[in-house]
Image (tube, rainbow, N blue to C red):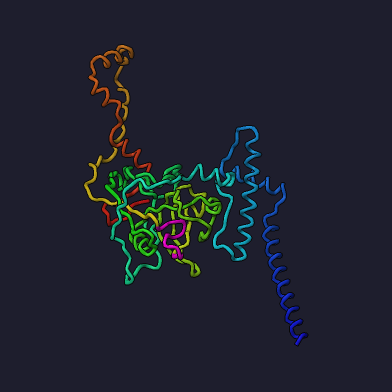
């Protein structure tokens, strides 16, 4: 009896020791994965600076940024080693934010929300019922409803502004149709039922949807690829756009368009966990979804841009050049005879020029509330 108890105790101790040894080995593998020589790290830093066009002018700033870069590299290596072991479903990389501390990143690229500043307009349009049959996957990029990813700077930084989180509202959207430019204005917006990923899925199945998320985590800052499952809450500080959803190896995800250029994430996009236990969704994605509404008439079509005037060649039979009035005299005459209204009109750019400038801000928009906007 005593021998049997002693044997069991010995086996239990041996098993415990084995588990501790395996855990230590796994931990050491992650640490060793992130250890790089100083020479290799500095070479990577130089390559990263060249790739992202980084240049530091202040005395000592390049070395200071290198120390931040090196610390982020350690974090990236440790995370990716864990991802290789199956702990994470996404990977990190040396993106454009690799020389920023997390505090600097949040201050420069994210907004701080203190209280709601706009009226909620929750619509039942996309309320999801148990009997709703929704597509297994949707990707509005493949349908031409999503504009090219660009670095929009602070656009989307403050989701608490009157604009819906994923786009800058009150901007004139331009739909390029052949050679004519059609001006489309967004009249209003509606909110998807909050805290319901099912309703958000139904909405995204019909059109791209503006959403706000908490993007302040270090893992989100350095995200590179995969289905983001990192730690985050619902302190909404960044506006993005849900442009689709799908599943990979049994893991559901949202396709989210960001506004930090193509060098961040998966060519400017991030796939985020979908159908999680929290009703708010990953990083609060289901808290404040909204979409634009088109009700009224569009502004008049300015028409195609007129052709540039061509200069007439000099006559072959002319023997003497035409006399021109002195520039000063011409200028004085014009200034004295032109009315203030005419002068103001002469300084205003033509309508076609305004339309072309607006087209640089956005392309394609919905012609009605049933058509997906270009995001």
Q: Quadrant of the N terminus?
A: bottom right
Q: Quadrant of residue 328?
A: top left
- Does 243 sit above or below residue 51? below
Q: Is residue 303 left or right of residue 145?
A: left
- Does 82 sit above or below residue 108? below
Please identify the residue farthest to the front as the structure is shown. Answer: 2
- Does 274 sit above or below residue 145? below
Give how far across and how far down residue 360 sits, in percent: 38, 41
- Asked if the stretch drawn in magenta spans residue 48, the answer is no
- Does 241 sit above or below residue 318? below
Please identify the residue farthest to the right as the structure is shown. Answer: 3
Q: Is residue 121 left or right of residue 265?
A: left
Q: Quadrant of residue 349?
A: top left
Magenta: main secondary structure: loop
- Comparing 301 with 188, the one in front is 188
- Comparing 230 with 90, the one in front is 230
Give how far across and how far down residue 198 sits, in percent: 37, 65
Residue at screen point 29% across, 44% down: 181
Magenta extent: 275-286
Q: Is residue 321 left or right of residue 274?
A: left
Q: Is residue 184 left or right of residue 68?
A: left
Residue at screen point 68% across, 45% down: 42
- Asked if the stretch drawn in magenta spans residue 283, the answer is yes
Give how far across and how far down residue 61 sits, in percent: 63, 36
Give how far across and how far down residue 243 sits, in percent: 40, 57
């Amino acid at each position: 009896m005593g021998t049997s108890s002693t044997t069991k105790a010995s086996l239990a101790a041996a098993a415990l020791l084995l588990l501790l040894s395996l855990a230590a080995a796994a931990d050491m593998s992650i640490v060793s994965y992130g250890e790089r020589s100083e020479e290799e790290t500095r070479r990577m830093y130089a390559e990263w600076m060249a790739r992202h066009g980084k240049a530091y002018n202040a005395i000592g700033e390049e070395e200071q940024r290198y120390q931040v870069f090196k610390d982020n590299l350690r974090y990236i290596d440790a995370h990716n080693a864990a991802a290789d072991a199956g702990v994470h479903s996404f990977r990190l990389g040396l993106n454009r934010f690799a020389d920023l501390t997390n505090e600097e990143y949040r201050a420069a690229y994210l907004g701080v929300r203190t209280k709601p500043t706009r009226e909620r307009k929750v619509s039942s349009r996309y309320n999801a019922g148990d009997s709703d049959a929704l597509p297994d996957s949707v990707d509005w990029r493949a349908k031409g409803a999503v504009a090219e990813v660009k670095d929009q700077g602070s656009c989307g930084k403050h989701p608490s502004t009157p604009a819906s989180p994923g786009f800058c509202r009150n901007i004139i959207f331009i739909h390029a149709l052949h050679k004519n430019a059609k001006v489309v204005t967004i009249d209003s917006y509606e909110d998807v039922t909050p805290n319901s990923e099912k309703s958000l899925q139904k909405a995204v199945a019909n059109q791209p949807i503006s959403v706000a998320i908490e993007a302040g985590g270090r893992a989100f800052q350095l995200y590179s690829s995969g289905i983001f499952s990192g730690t985050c809450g619902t302190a909404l500080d960044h506006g993005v756009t849900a442009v689709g959803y799908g599943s990979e190896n049994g893991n559901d995800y949202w396709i989210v368009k960001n506004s930090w250029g193509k060098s961040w994430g998966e060519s400017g996009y991030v796939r985020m966990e979908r159908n999680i236990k929290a009703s708010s969704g990953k990083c609060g994605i289901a808290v404040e979804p909204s979409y634009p509404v088109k009700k009224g008439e569009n502004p008049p079509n300015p028409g195609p841009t007129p052709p540039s005037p061509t200069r007439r060649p000099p006559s072959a039979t002319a023997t003497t050049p035409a006399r021109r009035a002195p520039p000063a005299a011409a200028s004085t005459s014009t200034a004295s005879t032109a009315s203030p209204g005419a002068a103001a009109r002469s300084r205003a750019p033509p309508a076609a020029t305004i339309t072309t400038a607006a087209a640089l801000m956005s392309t394609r928009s919905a012609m009605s509330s049933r058509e997906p906007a270009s995001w």
